[in-house]
Amino acid sequence: MSDEEHHFESKADAGASKTYPQQAGTIRKNGYIVIKARPCKVVEVSTSKTGKHGHAKCHFVGIDIFTAKKLEDIVPSSHNCDVPHVNRTDYQLIDISEDGFVSLLTESGDTKDDLRLPTDDNLLKQIKDGFAEGKDLVVSVMSAMGEEQICALKDIGPK
């Protein structure tokens, strides 16, 4: 062996832990999958048997969990796909700032001020109206692959 040392530059960041591999043939409807680097909820899966020497292929149709865009992908069923770690956390709404950010109360009693109001007009109106009426609101925040967005709202009664 040679005496020279090998230096490897690590290009990996914490992004490696944002997803985990799963065999394409085992991913089912209502599961999650990464299509074109976006976390998606699977709405349709079809498996096609191919010819003599080919692989069976899985055709996935998914809806991006943050933008609601429809994405499709075809993967051999024996290959691995990336599956995002999707978390849902509930926070109590404290305040809505003028520039469209919300102030949320975490379970540990800290505030979280780095989230924008949702882009969905219906949900946006519910949050603004409920807050204006002085209701105690709890928002569900969905996070996956380093992105976070408010996805649901619960009213826990008046303040």
Image: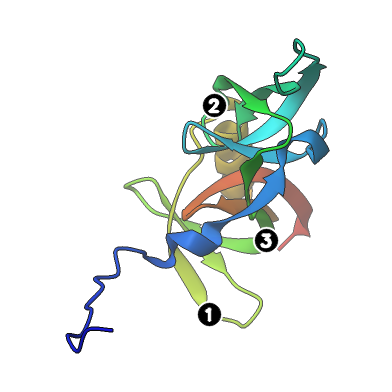
Q: Between marks 2 and 3, how big is the CA–CA gap?
A: 21 Å
Q: Which quarter of the figure has residue 137?
A: bottom right
Residue corresponding to mark 3: 89
Residue 92 % position (x, y)? 64, 63
Circles 2 and 3 in contact, beta carbons < 8 Å: no
Q: Foreground residue, 79 or 94?
A: 79
Q: Indicate the quadrant containing the N terminus: top left, top right, bottom left or bottom right.
A: bottom left
Residue 57 % position (x, y)? 71, 21
Residue at 30%, 70% in the rendered image: 10
- Compared with 86, 16 (above or below) is below
Q: Report the amino acid beneath label 3.
A: Thr
Q: Indicate the quadrant containing the C terminus: top left, top right, bottom left or bottom right.
A: bottom right
Helix, strand or loop at mark 2: helix
Q: Between marks 3 and 1, how big is the CA–CA gap?
A: 14 Å
Tell which circle, 2 or 1, labels the residue nearer the N-terminal end: 1
Find residue 121 and name its label.
Answer: 2
